[in-house]
Amino acid sequence: MEKAWWKESVIYQIYPRSFCDSNGDGVGDLNGIRSKLDYLQKLGINVIWLSPIYKSPNDDNGYDISDYQDIMDDFGTMEDFDALLKEAHEHGIKIVMDLVVNHTSDEHKWFVESRSSKDNPKRDYYIWREPKNGKEPNNWGSCFSGSAWEYDEKTNMYYLHCFSKKQPDLNWDNEKVRDEVFSMMDWWCKKGIDGFRMDVISMISKVPGLPDGNQSEGALYGDLSNTTNGPKVHDYLQEMRKQVLSKYDLITVGECAGVTIDEAKKYANLDGSELNMVFQFEHTSLDYENGGKWTTKRFNLPELKENLSKWQYELEGKAWNSLYWDNHDQPRIVSRLGDDSSLSAKCIATVLHMMKGTPYIYQGEELGMTNYPFRTIDDCRDIEILNAYKELVGGGYMTAEELMAGVRAKGRDNARTPMQWDKSHEAGFTTGTPWIKVNPNYTFINAKDELADEYSVFYFYQKLIGLRRKSEWSEVIVYGDYELLDKDDENVFSFTRSYGDRKLLVICNLSDRIIDYTLPLDVKEKACLISNYESSELSDEMFLRQWFAGVWEIE
Ligand code: GLC
C-alpha cells in the first residue's frame, strides 16, 4: 500500500457558525477560529475542514453560496481568512475548504442572470424545464421537503433545486459551468489551501431526460436516484483532477449521497484518477425507518458492524475509506450510539479511530458533546427540520410530538449548538446571544474542565490521535489490514489490525451492561495501547465492564 500524508491525517471539522464568536454578535467567525488554534494543536489533529465560509444569504447556513471568492459577512473578511490560513500552517495544521458546486445560491450572479430571460448567456448554467401538463417537469422531491422544482413566473419555466428553492442546481453538462468551477478552485489552491471536501458531489450528473425517480407507496415525491452517481460524474471528476487537483498536493473527499461500494471504488480509486476518499451514508442510515430519518430507532450492533466491516474489506487495496460518526448533518454519536456518558464517548471513539481510513472528528465530539433536548420547533433553526415540520406536521402525516422526538434523535441542529468552551456566559461561545441555544449541559461538559482533567474525553481523543499519528504503532493503525471478530455478538465490537508481523486487538463493549466475554483468539498480550478503564488485562475469559474499550498489541 502506497503511503500518503492524507492517509496518515486526522481531520477536525469546524462548523464556523457554532465554533467561537470573537465579536459578540452571536455567530461564530474566522477570528474565533484563529483564537482556538492552540487548542486544536493540543488535540493533535493536523487538518481542519471548514464548513462553508463564503458569501451567502444563509438559507442553508452557507451551503447556499452567492460568491465563491468572498467571505460571509458574519464570519469576517478575506484578510481574516488569509491570517487564519497562515496561522494554521504555522501550527502545523492544513485547511480543507468546503466546495459546494452542485448548486449555488439563487442570489449568485450567475443565477440572477440565468433567470432573467430565456436567451441570457447564463440560462444554461442551471437546469430549466418547461412545465409538464401544467405541472412540475418530473416527480423528484427535494431533500428539504416539497418538489425539487420551483416555478419561475418570469419565463414560465421551472428550475431544479435538489435542496432548498434558494439552492438551484448547476448544469454540469455545460462546459462553461465546469470551467468556471475549475478556475474558482484553482484560485483557492493558489492561495495555498490544502484540499476540498466536496458537497454532494455524487449529484452533479443528472440522468439525461430527467426521468421520474422511484416513488414508494405513500411517498409524496419520487427519490433523487436519477441525480446520484449519474452517467457523467466520473468523467467530470477526472476532468477536475486533470484541470486542477493534479497540479497541487491536496486532500480531497467527496460527500457521496447514495454511494455504493462499487461506485466508491471509482470515486476513491487508489490510482488517483478522481478523489482520495468518499463520505458514504450507509452506516448513518441504519437507524432510519422505512428510509425516513424522523424516528427514535437505535442502531442494531451486528448490523452496524457488518456494514462498517463491509467497507473495510471491500475497499482494501482498491480505494481509501473515510471514517466518521459525526458531522454538521448528523446527531451526536454519544447520544445516538452511546448513553451520553464520557465512558461511552471514549468507547465509541476507540472503534472509529482504530479502523482503517482517515478519521474525522466533528467539533465538540472530542468533549463528548451530546444531542440537545429540543422541546418545540421554536428551538430549531435548520431548514431541513423547519420544512419537514411544515410538510409532515402541517400535512397531518405526523404529530408535532412524533416529529420532535425524531428531531431530538436525528435532527441536524443537534450538531449545530454552540461549542462548549467553559462554564461562563453561553458556554464561553459568545458574549452576546447565540444564534441557536447552547446545550444546558455545558456546565459539566466543556473544554476548560476537560483540559484540567487527565481522564477526560478530550485527553482520550488526544491519545487516540497520537497513537495514529505519532507512535510506534502508527503504521499498523494507518496501514494494517482489518479483520472483524465475533460478528454476531450483540454487545461487543472487536477486531484486529495487522501489518507485517505486528498485530493489534481492539475490544469494545458497546453496551451499558457487564459482558462475560470469551476471547476469540489465542493470544499473548505484549502491551496495552489504550483503555478507558484502569485495569485492562487480556485473559481468555473477561468481564467487560460497561462501555469498556481496550487496544492491545498481541502475539
Ligand atoms: C450537504 C451538506 C448539507 C447541506 C447539503 C446541501 O449534504 O453537508 O449540510 O445542507 O449538502 O448543500
Image (spheres, rainbow, N blue to C red):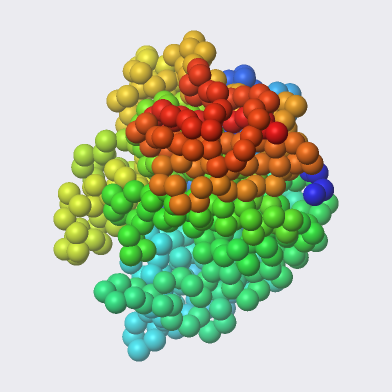
376 in relation to 275, above or below: above
322 in relation to 319, above or below: above
> Can you tell which quarter of the image residue 95 is in?
top right
| Residue located farthest toward the bottom when viewing the structure as drawn | 133
> In this view of the protein, which residue sits in the foreground, 468 or 244?
468
> Can you tell which quarter of the image residue 51 is in?
top right
Residue at figure coordinates x 48%, y 12% from the top left: 453
Residue at figure coordinates x 56%, y 28% from the top left: 538
> Is residue 315 something that shows in the picture?
yes
430 in relation to 1, above or below: above
Q: Position of residue 291 (x, y in %)?
A: 36, 63
> Is residue 430 something that shows in the picture?
no
Number of numbered tags placed on the structure image: 0
> In this view of the protein, which residue sits in the foreground, 277 or 495?
495
Q: Position of residue 231 (x, y in %)?
A: 63, 76
Q: Position of residue 4 (x, y in %)?
A: 79, 43
Quadrant, the C terminus: top right
Residue at figure coordinates x 53%, y 23% from the top left: 536
> In this view of the protein, which residue sits in the foreground, 233 or 449?
449
Q: Is residue 512 left or right of residue 449?
A: left
| Residue located farthest toward the top when viewing the structure as drawn | 452
Q: Position of residue 502 (x, y in %)?
A: 75, 36
Residue at figure coordinates x 44%, y 55% from the top left: 303
